Amino acid sequence: MKAFLLTAGLGTRLHPITQTLPKCLVPIGGKPLIDWWFESMQKAGVTEVLINLHHLPDLVMAHVNALDTNIKVEFSYESVLLGSAGTLRANQSFVQDQKAFFIFYGDNLTNTSLSNLCDFHVAQPHDFTMALFETNNPSGCGIVSLNEHFTVTHFEEKPANPVSNLANAGLYVASPKIISLIDPAKTPADIGFDLLPLLVNKMSGYKINDYLIDIGTHKNLEKARQDWPLLIS
């Protein structure tokens, strides 16, 4: 199975750390964040991963190329950021031979089972599955409503008046055909704003109760550094 690992962001909220270090290489629990992603992907049977690059790309490539991993890596450098959906669109050929593939936001840290997420997706009728978690800050997330059949019946990115506290976890399983829905004229194109609204009533939602945090702020990074060693010990 193949995966996209989206790591091209500038990480401006983590300055000054990310002025000289890409966000995916920020250390947590004794390892760069991206190393934890490779461990999780290997456990889930990922055989190939495409990593998009923009900020300090040489550092990311050098680190990943030195990893001891069985996962084949393809890098996609973006001189101009394409956005999360734009990256999928520009690299559609990478997954055209797949029945399903993973999409991960590389600034998340989670111990959830990616295999369980994939198994859930296979059992559902839709071409896209979004992992979901309960958030204390629904106005800062993509928020969904979910029916009894695990179908997402409402989605809104960072809503002023959230309908629930069930939020997009940034972990997806998708069929290649969903990439054709992304507007070819839109650059940058974002998964949350430009793709997920088109999939309402056409995608599944998978609730996770595991650890998940976006390490993209100093507050969250410090929390992750406190929490993670307890979870992996």
Image (cartoon, rainbow, N blue to C red):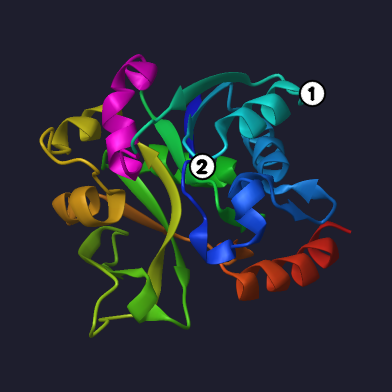
Rendered image: mark on residue 191: none
* SS for dot 1: loop
Give the amino acid at mark 2.
Thr
Q: Quadrant of residue 57?
A: top right
Nearest the viewer among 180 and 223 is: 223
Where's residue 37, x and y in %?
A: 65, 42
Q: Residue at x 52, y 55 (%)?
A: 11
Say if 210 sits above or below 123 in the image: below
Residue 145 in sight in this render: yes
* Magenta range: 81-97
Residue 110 in sight in this render: no
* SS for dot 2: loop
Rendered image: mark on residue 7: 2
Give the amino acid at mark 1.
Asp
Left or right of 191, for residue 30: right
- For label 1, the residue is 68
Prevailing SS of the magenta stretch: helix
Say if 51 sits above or below 116 in the image: above
Where's residue 115, x and y in %?
A: 57, 40
